Amino acid sequence: MPPIERVLNICDVLALQFSERADQHDRDGSFPFENASDLRDAGLPALTVPTEFGGSGALLCDMVQVLQHLARGDASTALGVAMHLHIMGQQAETRSWLPEPYEALCYEVVSRRLFVNTAASEPEMGSPSRGGMPATTATPVEGGYRINGRKSWVTFAPALDYILTSATIVSETDATQRLSGVFAVAGNAQGVRIQDNWGTALSVRASGSCEIEYRDVFVPARWHVETRRQGDLPRTPPMPPAWSASAFASVYLGVGEAALAAFATYARQRIPSALGKPIAELPSVQRVIGQMDVTLRAARAVLFETARRWDVKPEWRHTMAAEFAAAKYLCTNAAVTATELAVRAAGANGLDRRLPLERFFRDARAGLMHPPQDDLALELMGRQVIHPV
C-alpha cells in the first residue's frame, strides 16, 4: 500500500471537504452521498482488504489513524467508513466466513469500490452484543434464500452495496433447529426497503443509520457467507473485537480532537469589548484547553499503543480483550469530556449553531452506545484485574 502518510494526507483533504458540508447535512438530517463518492474515488474501501485480493492490506494501526483523521471532518461519514473498514479488516485476519463468498466480496470491494456493513440489530432484540437470535428469517428456496425481517441502526445504509444480514435459517425438516446465518444482500435488491428515519436523531444525524425492511428478498446461495448453530463454537478461535472497538474509539477520538481545535480557534478570535484581548490569553481558558488536550492525549496514547501491540505481537492477541475495552472506553469518554468542556467554556456561544461545538457535543454522545458499552467494558477490565490472564 502507499505509505500511511500519503493515505493520511488524502484523508486530511477529504476531512476538510466533509467539514464544509457537515453542518448542512446535520441540519437537514440528509445523507452525504457526495462524501461517499469522494471516499470511493480515493480508493478507501479497499484499505483493509488483503493484498492477495488486490486490496491495500492495511493493519489495525493504519485504520485507527485513517478514521481519526476523517472524523475530524465529519463524524457521520467517518462512522460509516469505520463500519466497512473494521468488517473487512477483521475478516482479513479471522477468515471466519466461507472462503468463496469472502474472496468474491473482496474482489468486488476492490474492483467496484463498494461499501458493506452488517445488519444485525433489530427493534425487538436490540443490539446483538447482548445476545439473542435474529427475528429476521432466511427460508431456503431454489437457488438460494428468501429473507424477511427488519433491521435497526444500519449505518451508511443509503450507500451500502452489500448488507451483511444476520438471519435465523428456517429448517424445512426440523422446526427446533436453531441455525443462524449471514447473507450478503445487495443494497439494490428487490424487496430491500430503507426507512430514512435517522435524520432527527441526537447524534451523527448524517450517518444514514436507518432501519431496513426485507420483504421476500432473494439472496443467491453463493452469498450465504456464514452459518452457525446456536451454542456451537465459532469456526475460528474467539478473539477480542479489536477491529470494531478500535474503529469506534478512533472515530470519537477524532470528534474530540475536532472540538479541541475548534474551541482553540474560537478562543483566539473571540475578543469581548470588555476584555480588549482574545479570551485565549485568559488563564482560565488556557486551563480548559489544557484539560481537553491532556484528556485526549491519554486516550490517544492508549489506543495507538494497543493497536500497535495487536499488529506486532499476534501471539498476545487472545489476551487483549480488556485492553481494547479500555481503549474504546477512554476514547469515547474523552470525546464526551472534551466536547462538554468546550461548550461550557464558550458559554452561550457554545450552544449557537454558528459554531460546530454543539454538533461535536451531540456527536460524541453516540460513542457511548457502541459496543462494548461502558458497563460491559468496565466489567471486562475488572475481571481481568481480579483474574489476570
Image: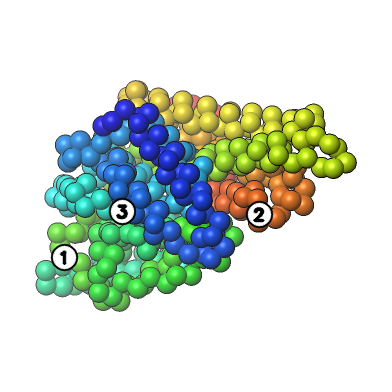
> Crowding near pointer 2: few (<14 within 10 Å), some, many (20+)?
few
SS class, disc 2: loop
Residue 329 — which label?
A: none
Q: Residue furthest right?
A: 274
Q: Quadrant of the N terminus?
A: top left
Q: Quadrant of the C terminus?
A: top left
| Three-letter code for the amino acid on which mark 3 is drawn | Phe
Please report whichever mark, 3 or 2, sits nearer to the chain's N-terminal start. 3
Residue 111 percent coordinates (x, y):
19, 49
Which residue is more in the foreground, 122 or 116? 116
Q: Is residue 372 left or right of residue 82?
A: right
SS class, disc 1: strand
Whole-Å distance between the Cαs marked 3 and 1? 19 Å
Residue 212 percent coordinates (x, y):
38, 69
User: Who's the residue at 78% across and 40% down the image?
Assistant: 271
SS class, disc 3: loop
Please report whichever mark, 1 or 2, sits nearer to the chain's N-terminal start. 1
Q: Nearer the viewer, mark 3 or mark 1?
A: 3
Whole-Å distance between the Cαs marked 3 and 2? 32 Å
Please report whichever mark, 3 or 1, sits nearer to the chain's N-terminal start. 3
User: Who's the residue at 22% across and 46% down the image?
Assistant: 110
**Residue pointed to by mark 2:** 354
**Residue pointed to by mark 3:** 115
Can see residue 11? yes
Q: Quadrant of residue 344?
A: top right
| Three-letter code for the amino acid on which mark 1 is drawn | Pro
**Residue pointed to by mark 1:** 220
User: Who's the residue at 48% across and 64% down the image?
Assistant: 30
